[in-house]
Image (cartoon, helix red, strand yellow):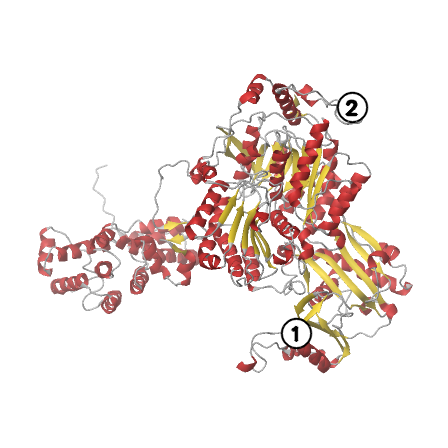
Amino acid sequence: MAQRAIREADGKMLMRRFVEEATGGELKLAIRCASIPVRFSGSPTGLPAEAGKPWVDFATAEVKNPWLPGCRLVVKPDQLIKRRGKGGLLLLDATWEDAKAWISERAGTSIEVDGVTGRLEHFIVEPFLPHAPTDEYYVCVQSIREADEILFYHEGGVDVGDVDAKAVRLAVPVGAEASESAIRETLLGGVPEARRSALARFLSALVRVYRELHFCYLEINPLVMTGEDTSSISPLDMAAKLDEAAHFLCRKHWAGVEFPPPWGAKETPEEAYIRSLDAKTGASLKLTVLNPKGRIWTLVAGGGASVVYADTIADLGFGSELANYGEYSGAPTEDVTYEYARTVLSLMTRHPRTDGQDKVLIVGGGIANFTDVAKTFKGIMRALVDAAVELREQNVSVWVRRGGPNYEEGLRRMRALGSSIGLPIRVFGPRTHITAIVPLALGLPADGLAVVEFTDDDAAGLTSMIAPPPSGAAAAAAAATPAAPAAAAAAPAAKASSGVPARTPPRSEAAAAAETAGRISAAQGRVDAVSPTGAPTLVKKAPWELFDASTRCVVFGMQTRAVQSMLDFDFMCRRDTPSVAAIVFPFAGAHQHQFYWGPSEILVPVYPSVTDAFRKHPDADVLVNFASYRSAFDVSMEAIRPDPPLVRSVAIIAEGVPERQSRILIAEAEAKGVALIGPATVGGIKPGCFRIGNTAGMIDNVIAAKLYRPGCVGYVSKSGGMSNELNNIMAQHADGVAEGVAIGGDRYPGSRFIDHLLRYEMNPDVKMLVLLGEVGGTDEYEVAAAIRDGRISKPLVAWCIGTCAKVFPYEVQFGHAGALANSAAQTADAKNAALKAAGAVVPDNFNDFVGCVRATYQGLLRAGDVKPVAEVPPRRIPMDFQWAKQLGIIRKPANFISTISDDRGEELLYAGLPISEVVQRDVGVGGVVSLLWFKRRLPEYASRFIDIVLVITADHGPAVAGAHNTIVAARAGKDLVSSLASGLLTIGPRFGGALDGAAAAFSTAIDEGFTPAEFIEDMRRQRKLIPGIGHKVKSVHNPDKRVELVKAFAKEHFRETPVLDFALQVEALTVKKKANLILNVDGCIAACFVDLLRSCGAFTREEADNSIAQGCLNGLFVLGRSIGLMGHFLDQKRLKQGLYRHPTDDISYVLPDVDV
C-alpha cells in the first residue's frame, strides 16, 4: 500500500464536509463541484449503432447538481493532470450549455500532456468565482518524518513560480496542534490584517482534517479569499493524496473516493484483476503493464528484487523492451501464484513478435526468508503448462534464479518441466548473482558475476538444514582452542595513531580460529551478576549495540515458525539462553508452548498482554511485533508509551501500517529513547548473537551465509528480501556480516540509514559499511552529509535501486510503499550521484555492486585493517520432522486416512470437488451428502431424493421419543449440543432406526427369491416383526402422506423399483390382517434407497450393498431428524419454558407390599 492520488472533486468534497465537522459547524466552505465521468458502454439513446461510443450522462449530472444550469462555470479534466490551465484544458466563465459542448467535444479523445498520452475520461465542473489576483494564495500541507508541514505564500495561481523557494513554512510536530496564533505569526505576514484570523482558523482546521482523514499531501493553488470571514474561502485548484494503508481506519469517511491511475496509465483489466487479487490475500501482488508488445517479461518474487531486475534490464539498454513491472511476495499460495503467473503469461503471448527477436521470461527473485520456493513454483509451473503451446510457438526462453526454503526442489521441478513441455528453461540457484540471468537471457556476457547453473547433481543434494562438520586445520584449531574469556574478548582492538587497527603479521589458522572465537564471545556478551530478586543483570550495552547474545525478546503473535527459527539460530550460535523470553497472544490465557532447543525441548511462556510479558521477564528488552497492520500500532505503543518504556528496541514486521501511525510511533520512540526497526521489515540480524524472526531465512541459508559468526561488514537495507542477498554477497565477497538491518520499505521507517551507519561507525568490530537504498525519500542525503563532515569515515559501498524509473512512460509505484519519487531529488540516480560525490563507493549499476564490495574488502585485507576469519563450526540443528517430510527425505504411516475431503490446498475439496464448484453448481445438501458419504456425484434426481428424505424425516411432532427427550433436556437448561444428543440417543430399533433393518430385510428377501408370502412366513417363524411395516396412527384408511410422496418420486424418476414393489406387495398382505400394518415412512424410504443405489449407475452391486450395510440409511434419518430436534430446542428456549416435571397423575405407582 502507498500514497495514492485522488480526484480533485473527491478532495474538495472531503474538505467541505470534514472542515465543517472539525470546527463544530463554525466553518462552512462554499464548495460545490460536479464530478462527471465519460461513459464507454451503452449509449445515450439506447440505439445499438451508438453503443461503445464515448458519451456523457448530463441529465443525471443535473439531477445530482441542480445548481449547474443557473451558474457561470469552470470546467477541467479531473485525471491527475498538472498545469491544466497552461495546457489549454480549462474552460472559464461558461454557461452550462457551453460546458456540455466543451466536455462533449473532448470526451474520450486522446491528448498528450508532458510527453504522456492519455484519454480524457473524467471532468469536474464548478461555479466560476470572480476575484482579484490579490485574493489568491498558495497553500500546501505535506507530511515529513517528524511533522506536518504547512507551506504558505501570499500569492497564488498558475504564475506563482517556485513555491519551494518562495513559501513560508510552519512545521507542526507530530502530536502537536496547529495553533491559530502560530499560523498567524509564522505564515500570514503577507496577508491583509483583516483576513488573518479567518485564514488562520481555516488553516488550523485544514491540518486537523489532513490528519484525521490520513492525507499525506494536499496542495491548493490558488486558495481564494474574497472577504474577511471564512465563508469567503474557496479552494479553486487542488491536488491531494491519501495514505491507502489507512483504508481500514477511514473506510466510512472515504466512501465513494476513487484512486484513479496516473495520467496516461490506463489500468488494464489484467492490472485490475491482480489488484483485486492482492486485496483478497495476505500476500503482496503487483502488476503494471509498461509495454504490452515488449520482449522482456518478468515474474519476480520480492519488492526489492523486482526493482533490481527492472534496473538491470534498463541499465543494459533494454528499458524500452521491458513489458511489465511487478512482484509477488509474502508467501502466496500455489493457487494465487498460478493466477498471477497465468495473467502475466496471457499478456506475454498476446502479441507475437514479428521482428525476429524472441521473447524472454525472467522468473527471478532473491533468497527467500520464509516462502517455500517449491510451493510457489508449483503455481508458476501450472501456468507454464497451460501456456506451453503459445510459448513454444513464440520461441520464448525462460530464465530462473531463486534461493530460499526448498529452493533445490523448486529448481529441480522447474528444470524437469522444461524437458517435459519442450520449453527451454535454464535454472540457477543462490550461488549465481541475483541479476546475472538478465544479461544471459539477453545474449550478453555476465562479466565479473558468479554464474553457476543448477544441475541434476545439485538437485540430488536436498536441503539438509544440518550444519556441516568442520574439516582440516580449521576443525583441529577449533577443537583445540577454547573460547576466549569474556573480559579478554570484549577488550577493544589495539589502535594505531591514525585511528586504524594496527597491522599484525600473518597468523596460523589456529590463531585465526582463536580470534574468531574471541570475536563471537565479545559480540555475545555475558551475564554480569544476579540481582537480589534473582533476575539477571546484563552487562551494559555499548552505545553502538542494539543486540548482543544476552539479548532477550518478547514476540507478539503466535508465530511458532519464526520463534523456532530464532531458537535454532540461538542454539547454533552457542548462546547460553534462548533469545525468546516469552510470547504474547491476546486470544488465549497464560500458558506455555513447546519448542525445540537443539535436540531437546523447552517451554516458552505465553501471556495475554505485552505489559504482563515484560513485567514477568525484566531481562527482555526487545519486542518483535508480528501483529497485523491493524493492531501493530497499538501493540507497539503498549511497549513504548510507559515511562520508563518496557523495551529498548521494537521491530514491527507488518506491512501496511498507516503512515500517520508510523510517524506517531517514531515521535514517541525518539522521546523515550527506544530504537525502532520497521514497519514492513523482515527485521535484522547480529551474527553469532541474535536474529529477529525470519531474518536470513532457513538454517541452511544461515550456514551458507556464515551468519553463525560475525564478519566485518555492517549493512543497512530498505528491502528485507534483498537483505538476504546482502548476507550472501558479504559471505562470498567479504568475510561476512557483523550486523545487518532491514529498516523497511515504508516511506517513514522507524529508523533511518544514518542511525545504523553511525552505530556501525562507532563499532570497532565493523570495518566496512554497506547501504542498499532505493528510489523515494531523502534519507540517503543524510548519509552523504555524514561522509562529508567526517562522521562516517569507514569505507561505505552504497547503491540506490530504482534507476529504471526514468525509462518508464509514467509514474510507477514500486513494490515498497516508500519506493516512489515525489521530486527529482528523490530519484535513485540523484541519490547515487550525491553519495558518490560525498566519497562513497558507488557502482555504475547493481551488477557492479558485488565487484565494489569485493574490491573494498580486498583493499582492507591488503592494508591489514581486517584479518581473514577462520571458521568456528556451529552446532548441528536437527531437521524438523514436518520439513523433512515435505522434502521427501523421510516417511511415516499416517495416523488417519481420509478419502472424502481435503483442507490442505487453497480451498476445501469435497471428494475432489472444490468447494467453490460445489456452491456454483448448486449441488445442494443432497449433492454434498453424495460427495461426503459416497465419494461421488450422484445423478441430479438422486440428490433431489436425498433432499426429499431429509425434509420428510426432519420432524414428526413433539410427542415422539427423540423430540420429547430434546425438549426435556432443553427445559433443564442444557445447551443445544447436549439437548440434541439427548434426542439422538433415542434413535434405535424402536424409534427411527428401522431404515437399515427394513432395507436389509426387503433386499435380502428379493435376492434370495422369496415371495412376499414366504417372506412374511419366514419372519413369523423367526418371531420377528417386519421392519418398515406398521404404524401407531396411520392405516390403510388414513395413509401417511410422506409415504405417498416418496413412492411417487421414486416411480417417476428411478430407473427401476423392484425392492419398493416387493415391499408394497408385502403391505398388501399385512393390511389384510390389520389395517395399520402399512408400509411406513421408514420402510418406504429404505426400499426406495436400495433401489436408488442399485439402479442409478453410480455403484456396483457390491458397493451399493456395502453402503447399506454400513448404516447410511439410519444416517439419513439422524441427519434429517437433527433439524427438527434443534428446532424443538430453539422453540423451548424462545418460549422460556421452565424445568419439566412429569405430572404424577400420568404415572401409575405400583410398589410392592412391604411389611414394615
| On screen, residue 1087 above or below 513 | below
Q: Which residue is labeled 1 in the image?
A: 109
Residue at left 26%, top 55%?
Answer: 1113
Give the answer, above or below, for where 446 lies relative to 764: below
Q: Mark 1: which secondary structure?
A: loop
Measured from the top left, where is residue 889 in percent x and y? 42, 36
For the N terminus, the quadrant is bottom right
Note whether 393 is above or below 482 in the view shown.
below
x, y percentage for residue 892? 37, 36
Relative image position of residue 173 (x, y in whole percent): 78, 49
Which of the image's four quarters has the C terminus? top left
Q: Earlier in the sequence, mark 1 or mark 2?
A: 1
**Residue in the image at 58% along x and 64% along y:** 268
Q: Quadrant of residue 922?
A: bottom left
Quadrant of res 528: top right
Density class for disc 2 (Cα within 10 Å; few <14, some 14-19, many ≥20) is few
Dot 1 amino acid type: Thr
**What amino acid is found at the position of numbered circle 2 in the picture?**
Ala
Q: Secondary structure at mark 2?
A: loop
- Residue 690 or residue 1055, whichever sits in front: 690
Label 2 sits on residue: 496
